[in-house]
Amino acid sequence: MNNLVNQNSQDEQAEDEISLLDLLQTVADNLKLLTLGPLAVGVTALGISFAITPTYTATTQFLPPQQQQSAVAGMLASLGGLGGLAGAAAGLKNPGDQYVAYLKSNSVEDALIERFKLQERYDAKFKQDTRDKLEKNARISSGKDGLITVEIDDTDAVIAAQLANGFVEELGNLLDRLAVTEAQQRRLFFEKQLKQTQDKLTQAEQALRSSGVNASALKSNPQAAVVAVAQLQAQVTAQEVKVASLRGYLTDSAPDFKQAMTELGALRAQLNKLEAAGNGQSGANSDYVARYREFKYQETLFELFAKQYEMAKIDEAREGAVIQVLDVAQPPEKKSKPKKALIAILATLGSGFALLLYVFVRQALRNASQSPESAEKIGRIKASFRRAFGLKPTQAKTST
């Protein structure tokens, strides 16, 4: 029994050795083809690479505007919710990614398309096709070092450098229209609030003048009471805005939100108490007091917003959305594509592998054709392929 097992093992080893020798014999028989074929393909690919239009890559690196802590961040507490709402959007987890998105925006791309006449240069029928071509030629990335890199490919070295620098310039133009930094966001917020409050203050002043001032109104001396009510109304408004801003990122059960609601309830109770005390005045007096109260209320808000608006403008001027260019793109002296040596090597290796596979398959078919059973199977396979492609089956030759 052991002798039989040993005999089978020896037979299998002999078959493996014969198969390996057959493969080596096949390679040796076709050594000329396997050597000269890939070399010819590699030389041909190298020659073709010289006919390919060279591509140049221009690179620029810059440091995007940095988020800074404003000088009046602590003073926003004087406005309560207004200050919180103005600074809620401040602070970015990864500002570099945001500026990369700006560079890839349609606004920047369209500006470059118009500036450099890229639609004609890329021979594109539609602007979207031009954008796609520009995005294909542009590589924009943000590194861990905080620098943003813009790489542009073009067949003209000068145009490549101009496009790379153009991306940075158009980003600066875009940032001039957007409120990106904390100071810019606060300035924009208070600018809107200041304009609205100014309009309301003008209306309140006109209403107060039209009410007239009589002796009984002067005797009532409502100024002290009205000023207190107006200031309290301003505090209620500020607290309401604070609650609205907290609701955006806190739940109703959060301690800070509950405390803000408690403070708002207390302010409203004080305001209702003061307003109830003034409701017993006569009609003329009541009309004058109400209009005077509205005037002082808008005046107080206007002063608060004006103060914070000026602070935001100072911070914006100090901070600024400054783009610091580290490396200005220069026309590259060497082309980046095509890589002739790499093309030749890959073509040689690829064609060598394809020819080796072809030689083995051809030899396998030759060996199979020597067996009647295998020859019949090969014939059926060929017939199936011919039927699949709609070719006529081959006619067997008849001898006369």
Image (cartoon, rainbow, N blue to C red):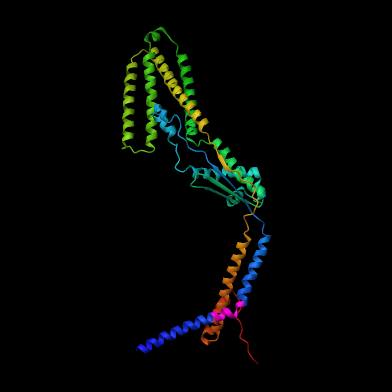
Q: Is residue 25 magenta?
A: yes
Relative to 95, say whether 263 is above or below: above
The secondary structure that dominates the magenta segment is: helix
Q: Residue at x 55, y 44 (%)?
A: 103
**Residue 95: x, y in percent?**
48, 42
**Residue 290: x, y in percent?**
40, 17
Left or right of 204: which side holds 172? right
Left or right of 6: which side holds 365? right
Q: Residue at x 60, y 65 (%)?
A: 345
Q: Residue at x 37, y 32 (%)?
A: 243
| Magenta-drawn segment | 24-31
Left or right of 268: which side holds 316? right
Q: Is residue 362 magenta?
A: no
**Residue 69: x, y in percent?**
45, 34
Check the picture and name the quadrant holding the C terminus. Answer: bottom right
Q: Residue furthest top?
A: 215
Left or right of 93: which side holds 327? right
Relative to 300, say whether 394 is above or below: below
